[in-house]
Image (cartoon, helix red, strand yellow):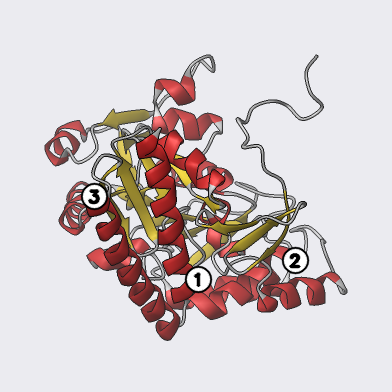
């Protein structure tokens, strides 16, 4: 008999009832150090007082009115995002998947309105993850994502990650945009080198294409800049945001330049819940923290400390780990042992990590974790590694 919750997840046998900072507690009192943050969602940790206050204060006044009306909290969050980014305008969604849908629509509508309706193709890369909607899985193109869900939405050209020559050769009269994650998350914490991101921007400029960046996982302070593309000194035309922007409340957004968004006029897109007062009140509180330069400087300092300790861990357990990669507090440990064995050994030692492709475990801790949390995290990873090595 099928369970009442559709069985689409391979869930760990854990149930949490309370969270505080970088820690989660089960019903029987076990305390887990959380290096997953709900897959990079709880950017300010669990039950952050400012987010609790923002949510409860707003909840006492107004939850939902729909986008038939002006929403002051939505306007405030849009203004903050425009102030701190390349963007001129913002559309709010409930998730990264919805943000992908709009990014694809926006790019195609842009060229339709320019009198070039044939320009519909979007170049994407292997190892990518853009959500699980019809557009998202078609954009990623992997068999794991697409098998059994045909016919797939056409209009995506899939290239090898890091193949700049392939990008140049793939551009045609039908090309509308290039879409890429500055740091692949599900794909195994694979950063796009700054020089490659600059080259992609240059290719878009040369051929009149739009550059779409998916910063759903790597954005909102995760890499030590407000958004990861800032490290390369480039700007996209369209950017997808979610996860950390709501600090745990379902919230996403598409940020765009005025030009890129020019085709999206009244009636071309909508969302019943997107940008509701609750979500945007929390998003404003998140932005007040992560857009602060002193906060980002601390993210970078802690990232350096964690990475240094992880290098030592790898040196001590070369039979379990191969390398550490990533940026800021978006790090991956490439494993020699099976990554799921390391994840499960972490659970045995009250530590949460997240598996990814390329035999990697992801370390995506709250950006607010302390130096003491870092020391404890590496201690528990050490115990997990020893357990795997002894198995």
Q: Which residue is mark 2?
A: 278
Residue 221 can be seen, yes or no: no
Q: Are marks 3 and 1 in contact (CB under 8 Å)?
A: no
- Side of 174 relative to 103 (left or right): left
Residue 5: x, y in percent?
77, 30
Q: Give how far apart the Cα atoms at labels 1 and 2 are.
A: 25 Å
Residue 295: x, y in percent?
45, 81
233 relative to 248, above or below: below
11 relative to 219, above or below: above
Residue 139: x, y in percent?
41, 33
Report the residue at 53% width, 50% height from top.
349
Callout 2 secondary element: helix
Q: Give how far apart the Cα atoms at labels 3 and 1 are.
A: 38 Å
Disc 1 or disc 2, which is closer to the eye? 1
Count the numbered circles shown: 3
150 relative to 187, above or below: above
Residue 85 can be seen, yes or no: yes
Q: Residue furthest front?
A: 390
- Mark 1 / mark 2, whichever is N-terminal: 2
Report the residue at 46% width, 82% height from top.
292
Q: Which residue is mark 3?
A: 204
- Mark 2 / mark 3, whichever is N-terminal: 3
Q: For label 1, count other residues whose C-alpha is less than 10 Å away and answer few (under 14), some (14-19) or many (20+).
A: many
Q: Residue furthest right?
A: 60
Residue 364: x, y in percent?
46, 56
> Front-most of 152 and 26?
26
Place residue 77 in its image quadrant.
bottom right
State which quarter of the image contains the C terminus.
top left
Report the residue at 31% width, 59% height from top.
310
Callout 1 secondary element: loop
State which quarter of the image contains the N terminus.
top right
Q: Which residue is mark 1?
A: 369
């Amino acid at each position: 008999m099928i369970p009442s919750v559709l069985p689409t997840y391979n869930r760990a046998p854990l149930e949490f009832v309370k969270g505080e900072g970088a820690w989660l507690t089960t019903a029987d009192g076990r305390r887990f150090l959380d290096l997953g943050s709900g897959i990079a969602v709880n950017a300010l940790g669990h039950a952050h007082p400012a987010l609790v206050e923002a949510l409860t204060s707003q909840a006492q006044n107004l939850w939902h009115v729909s986008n038939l009306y002006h929403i002051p909290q939505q306007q405030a969050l849009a203004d903050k995002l425009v102030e701190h980014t390349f963007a001129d305008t913002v559309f709010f969604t409930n998730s990264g998947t919805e943000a992908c849908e709009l990014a694809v629509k926006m790019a195609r509508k842009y060229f339709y309105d320019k009198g070039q309706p044939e320009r519909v193709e979007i170049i994407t890369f292997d190892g990518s993850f853009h959500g699980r909607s019809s557009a998202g899985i078609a954009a990623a193109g992997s068999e794991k994502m697409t098998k059994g869900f045909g016919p797939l939405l056409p209009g995506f050209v899939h290239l090898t990650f890091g193949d700049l020559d392939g990008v140049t050769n793939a551009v045609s009269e039908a090309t509308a945009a290039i879409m890429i994650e500055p740091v692949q998350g599900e794909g195994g914490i694979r950063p796009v080198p700054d020089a490659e991101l600059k080259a992609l921007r240059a290719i878009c400029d040369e051929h009149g294409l739009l550059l779409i960046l998916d910063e759903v996982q790597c954005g909102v302070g995760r890499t030590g800049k407000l958004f990861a593309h800032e490290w390369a000194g480039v700007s996209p035309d369209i950017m997808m945001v979610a996860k950390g922007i709501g600090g745990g409340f379902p919230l996403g957004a598409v940020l765009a330049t005025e030009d890129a968004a020019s085709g999206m006029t009244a009636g071309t897109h909508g969302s019943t819940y997107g940008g509701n007062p609750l979500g945007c009140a929390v998003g404003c509180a998140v932005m007040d923290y992560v857009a602060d330069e002193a906060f980002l400087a601390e993210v970078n300092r802690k990232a350096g400390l964690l990475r240094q300790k992880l290098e030592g861990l790898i040196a001590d357990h070369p039979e379990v780990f191969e390398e550490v990669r990533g940026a800021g507090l978006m790090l991956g440990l490439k494993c020699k042992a099976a990554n799921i064995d390391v994840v499960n050994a972490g659970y045995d030692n009250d530590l949460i990590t997240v598996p990814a492709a390329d035999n990697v475990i992801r370390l995506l801790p709250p950006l607010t974790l302390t130096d003491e949390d870092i020391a404890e995290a590496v201690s528990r990873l050490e115990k997990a590694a020893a357990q795997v090595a002894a198995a």
